[in-house]
Each structure stands twice: as C-alpha cells, then as structure tokens.
Image (cartoon, rainbow, N blue to C red):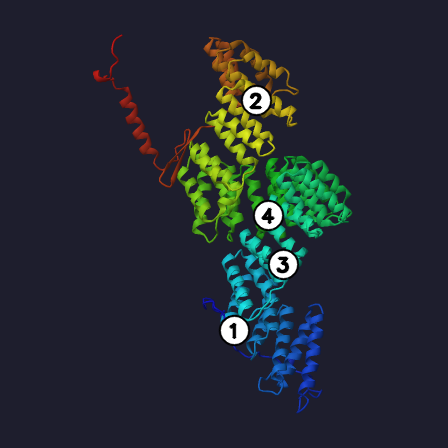
Amino acid sequence: MCKFPMRFIATGFLRSRKSLLLSRQYLPNTKKKPFMPGKGGGFQSWSSFNESLSSLLKKSPAHSHLQEARRLHALMLVGSILNPDSDIAAQASLLGSRLVQVYAQLGCLKEALLTFGRLHCVHNIACNAILRAYVDSAHFSQAIHFFYHLVFKLGFIPDNYTCPLILKACSELCALEEGRKTHDLIRYAEVHYYFKPNVYTKCALIDMFAKCGSLDEAQMVFDDMPQKERDLASWTAMICGTIHQGHGQEALCLFNTMRLEGTDPDSVVMAAILPACGRLGARQEGMALQGCALKSGFHCDLFVSNAVMDMYCKFGDTHQAYSVFCRMPSKDVVSWSTLIAGYSQNCEYERSLELYLEMINLGVKPSAIIVASILPTFGKLNLSEQGKVMHGFILKQGFDSDVVVTCALIEMYSSCGLAGELEVLLSLWSDWDIMIWNSAIAGHAACENFDLALSVFRKIWESKCKPNSITLVSILPICTKVGALKQGMEVHCHAIRSSLIRAVTVSNSLIDMYCKCGYLGLGLKVFDHMMEKDIVSYNTIISAYGFHGYGKQALVLFDEMKSLAMKPSKATFVGLLSACSHAGLVDEGQSLYISMINSYGILPNMEHYSCMVDLLGRAGRICDACNFIRTMPEEPDGNVLGCLLAACRVHNMVEPAYLLAKEILQDKLEDSGYHILLSNMYASTKKWKDASRIRVRIKEKGLRKKPGKSWIQIGHCTHIFDARDTTHSEYNKIQVFLETLMSEMKKPCVVDPCFSLPSL
C-alpha cells in the first residue's frame, strides 16, 4: 500500500453505495422478449454488451447515445450481468468499468459515480474515465480529492493515463504541494510496483512544476530523462513552462539547445518563443526565428502569425505588425485583439480605435478578448462616455463575469479619473481573484487614491489569495510615493518567503523603493544579491546614484555594464546625464551624450535634451544651454524651456529669462509652475507690470497649480494630507495644536547666554 498518510477523504457522493434507480423508460420493450442469459451463454452476452459499449465510446457524445447507454445499463441489471457472484465476475468488472467510461465521456458524471460505486473491483479504465471527466469540466479540486480517495481508500495504483490527468489538475490550481505528492507517489510506484512513467507522464511533471513556479524541479525531471526520450513534447513543456515564469532568456537558450540536438520546432513552440523575444527586446533573434518559421512552412499558420504580430508590437514596431496582419490569409479574434492591444500599448490610441471601428464595419462581432483590448484605449483617450456604452455592451453580452474584461474596465475608469464609478464596479464584484486585486491596486493608484490602494493590499492578506509578482510590483511604487517604508519592508519580507524575490521585476521595484525613500544602501544590497540582472536593474541604480548625488559611482556602474556586454537603452543615458547634472560633471555628461549618438546609435529625445540643458544650466553655462536649444533638430517642449528658466532663476540671469517669456506666452508651457517662476523673476527685478501680466495670463488660460499633498506613516497607518483638506478624522485636534504652535512662535525669544556667539 502507499506510504502517504490518509489526510484526504472522499466526498459524500463518492462513498455512497446507493443503487441506480432506473425508470420504466429505460427498460426494454415488453413486446420483445428480454434478454436473460442462461448457462454457458454468459460470455457471449458479455461480449455483446462490450461491443455495444465500445461502439458508443467511438461516437461523438449525443443525447441519443445517452439514452442507448441507459438502455444497455438497464438490460445489464435485469440480466444480472454486473452481478459480482456470476460466473463472469472478471468480465462483469470490466464491463462495469466500460459503462462508467461511457457515462463519463457523455458528461453524465453523477451516473458515472453511482455506477462506479457499485463496482466490486476497481479497474483503471473507470478511475481514469472519472478523473478525465473532472479535469475536462475544470473541476480540478474534485479530481484531486477523487484521486486521493482511490489511492488511500481503494489501494489504486496510477498508470500512465492517470498521472498526466492528476498533474494537469495540480498545474491548473498551482497546487505545488499536491503535485509534489503525486511525484512522490510515482517514484514510490516505480520502486514497489515496477511502474515505468512514459514520456507523457514526464512531460506532465515538467509542465506542472514549471506552471507552479518551481523551474528547478522541472529542470531536474527534464535532465533525468534519457536523451532518446527527449522528444518535441518534452522540449515544448520545458520551454513553455520557462516562458510562463517570465524567464525568456532561459527559454531562448533551451530553444537553441533543442535545435542543436536535432529536434525541429513545431508551430506550438514557435508561437510561444516569438512573443518571448518581444518581451526581451531581442529583435535580431526574433527576426531570425520568424525566418525559421517561414522556412518550416508556418507562414500560413494562424497561431504563428499572431505570435509574430505580438512580437513586433512588443518591439514597438506596429508598422511591421500591421504588415503581417495584412498578409494573413485568415484572421481570428486573437489577430484583431493582438493588433488593437499592440497599438494601445505603444500609445497609438487613435490607430487602435481606427482598427476597432474597421473590425466593426467588417461585421466582426467583438468578443470578450477584443473588448478587453479596446477598453484601455477608451481610457487613454478619455472617452468616458464611449467607455460607459461599452460597459453596457459587456453587461448585455454577459462578459461582466470575465476577469480579464473586468480588469480592463477597472483600467478604463481609472484612466478617465472616474473614481466613483471605479468604486461602484469594485463593490459589485464578488469573486475576487489575484488579477482583480492587482487591477484594483493599479486603478486606485492611477486615481491617486494611494490610501485606498494600500487598504486593498491589506485586504489581500485577509482573503484566500496570495500576492504574486505583479501585486508586489504594483504596491511598491505606492509605498515609495507615500513614504510607507515599513510596508515596503513587509513586502520585501513576503517576497523573500514566497521566493518572489527571484523575479527580476520585483527586485527592481524594491531597489527603486529603497533608493527613493533615502535608503541607497539597502537598495544596493538588493542589487548585489540579485541572481539575474537586466537593463532595468542597472538603470534603476544609475538613476539612484544620480538622485543621491553620486555621479562618479553612476559612471563606474556604466563601465561595469559595458564590460558585461550589456547594451544600454535610452533610459540608461537619461539616468547617466541626470547623474552628471546633479554632480556637476559637465565634461563627462557632454562626452556621454556624444557617445550615445555615435557609438550606440541612439537618437536623443526630449528627455535627453532636457538633461543636457539642465546639465549646462546648473553649471551656470546659460549661453551654452541656449546655443544647445538652438541646435536641436526639433522645437523644444515645456520641460526643456522649464530647465533653462529654472537655471536662469538660480543664477540670477534675467536677460535670457526675458527672452523665454515670449516662448512661454506663446502656449509652449502649460505648467502653471513655470509661469509662477517667471512672474517671481519679474517681481524680483521690480517689473511689477510684467509680473502682473503673467498672473493675469495664468487666470486667462485656466492654469492651476495642483494642490500639494503630504504623507506620514504612524505604525501601520498612513495619513494623507491635502492642501485645504478638512476631511481628516483628527482635523480639529490638528488645528488646535497648530494654533498653539503659532502662539508659541509669536512669543519674544530669550537667548541663553551659554549659546550666544562670542564677540569678534
């Protein structure tokens, strides 16, 4: 018997031994002589029933087949064919198992279970049939409970049909511990019952471990497979599992190894690996794989074409993605939704909306996945009314129960700033899973309701859901904005306990949180302990060095990046130029700017221009900054002009500021802060009319300074204060204390002679 403890019990209906009540409609026609087997005729009758059941198993499920199965069942009961005391007990057990298999295949799980309960001998055919019925109907928990009932109560030994089924149930539920127990059971059966797991069982083990987040165990199973057993299915399981956990680079290495060992990819592997190249930004590798797919004859494959589109959208090359879309001989809803979402993700919201309208004009009915793709576009374009109309369409079509659609609705309402509608939507949702929790956090953060976002995160701990890497990446920037360092540290502890710290995105967010909260040392510790670093990891530390005034350390880290052959991005140079600006490293900054263009082929954008103007302006080289702006290939935006204006204010360079006034008044700066800065500069030189003119201009344009906010964390509670806000629960106490402080400040000050300065 098995070594596992009997911790799981079967549900009530599994233990039930009730007889199957058959109504008269299932009995044979009374005009015909019913079959009653006699002596010597038992085997012949068993053979006849077996042939009939086998015939039903080969047919597609239909209501008439269910009627036929019930008729045969009734005949067996009347003829005592299933009687364990008959001369054909072994055949009766097999026949009953076949009947269970027929009921399970027809989707009649209740009848299958009741028939199973009457079997005097457990047969693998019946057990596997019920397990398959549970798994096919997505009743994964019931499948696991039934499996343990079979093993611990009935002494069932699983075979190579059972194991893939139960492992799939474990993977769908992310039940890693149950999967490990099943793996132990397989190894126990290998030793004691000479069970030999085939390639399907091993592939199911790899898939289960990978989907449950244990890539090390998946790799161990894969490595233990003999070379001749490593077929395309096992490689596919390992590669897809690695991609599922977000390790695209490892998946690409596995794919290359597979090809070197002589295994050619199929469309499934190609459709999985191409988007992974997109996520990695590996354009050359992705284009090479696209060529490989074309040579392999997958150019007409719908799944591969959709994957190629997705890859180009992730590269930001929507033009090439659209070219692939136009060349596709046939399109499905995934094709439309991939390109619609791709335009939206690349901030081409108008093109996303145009493609959606084109799809509607062609008579393609929006599916749930297309609705989920277009909703963020409505939010970004602030089309709140159209978004509400789409919400009505969602309710009418019954898409409101779809988690992905609900998440898209949350994003749409939060992007439109409709915090009230967002609250109503969240209050109506009952079946919360981690995707909804994550969307709620992101939605509240987008509406700047950081206290609500933190309260949602606290509620996750009270629910049955476990925070995943996306949850942590969403909540850590909020902890940064409100200065909730303690909660950030708690998130760090959870990341370590749950092994989510291995996710590069989580570690990057932790580095950013610690550095922006003033704890550069803790951020560096997280960086040093990272097993795998990407370009974002280095960019985050470089920006942190610049923020804290350590420009030279940022340059040293950049040299380390170059020694690792890591290609810098646009964000890398933004961080480096900003670090040089804060540290006064003008020559180094100018050299970096030139090398960015000449050595790395990166064309500067407005962020780089702003950094260069800030670099020169902080150093007091206002004329050089003005000349730099004149040589820019495009018109300067508000940030560039704002950096120059701030430098003029710091160095009291009034004349260039007067020249900037013309640009500001020509609507190039929409930020009220820059207008106020210019007004103050006029006032400091006693040009009162000009200062007044700027103030009038602010009112005419309707520019308003955003009210200030401040946060303070006391224990586990974060208090948020808005300018002129009177809604705080302790507002009256705060006002009384402020009045006391003000009165104390107005009292005459008596200086203690002990602290007075000696006369010179």
Specify which label sits upstream in the sequence, 1 or 4.
1
Q: Earlier in the sequence, mark 3 or mark 2?
A: 3
Q: Amino acid at mark 2?
A: Ser
Question: Badge 1 is on which residue?
Answer: 155
What residue did someone put label 2 on? 610
Distance Cα–Cα, label 3 vs label 1 = 30 Å
Q: Secondary structure at mark 4?
A: helix
Badge 2 element = helix
**CA gap, disc 1 to disc 2?**
73 Å
Give the vertical position of 558 relative to 669 (above or below): below
| Above-or-below relation of 43 to 470 | below
Q: Residues within 10 Å of mark 3 (few under 14, many from 20)?
A: few
Q: Is residue 705 visible?
A: no
From the viewer's perspective, is the residue at label 3 or at label 4 nearer?
3
Please tell me the numbered disc located at residue 226. Answer: 3
Closer to the camera in the image, 76 or 286: 286
The residue at 69%/69% (across/down) is 62
Q: Nearer the viewer, mark 3 or mark 2?
A: 3
Which residue is denoted by mark 4 in the rendering? Answer: 405
Give residue 212's quadrant in the image: bottom right
10 Å neighbourhood of mark 4: few (<14), some, or many (≥20)?
many
Q: How many marks?
A: 4
Residue 93 at x, y percent in the picture? 60, 79
Amino acid residing under circle 1:
Gly
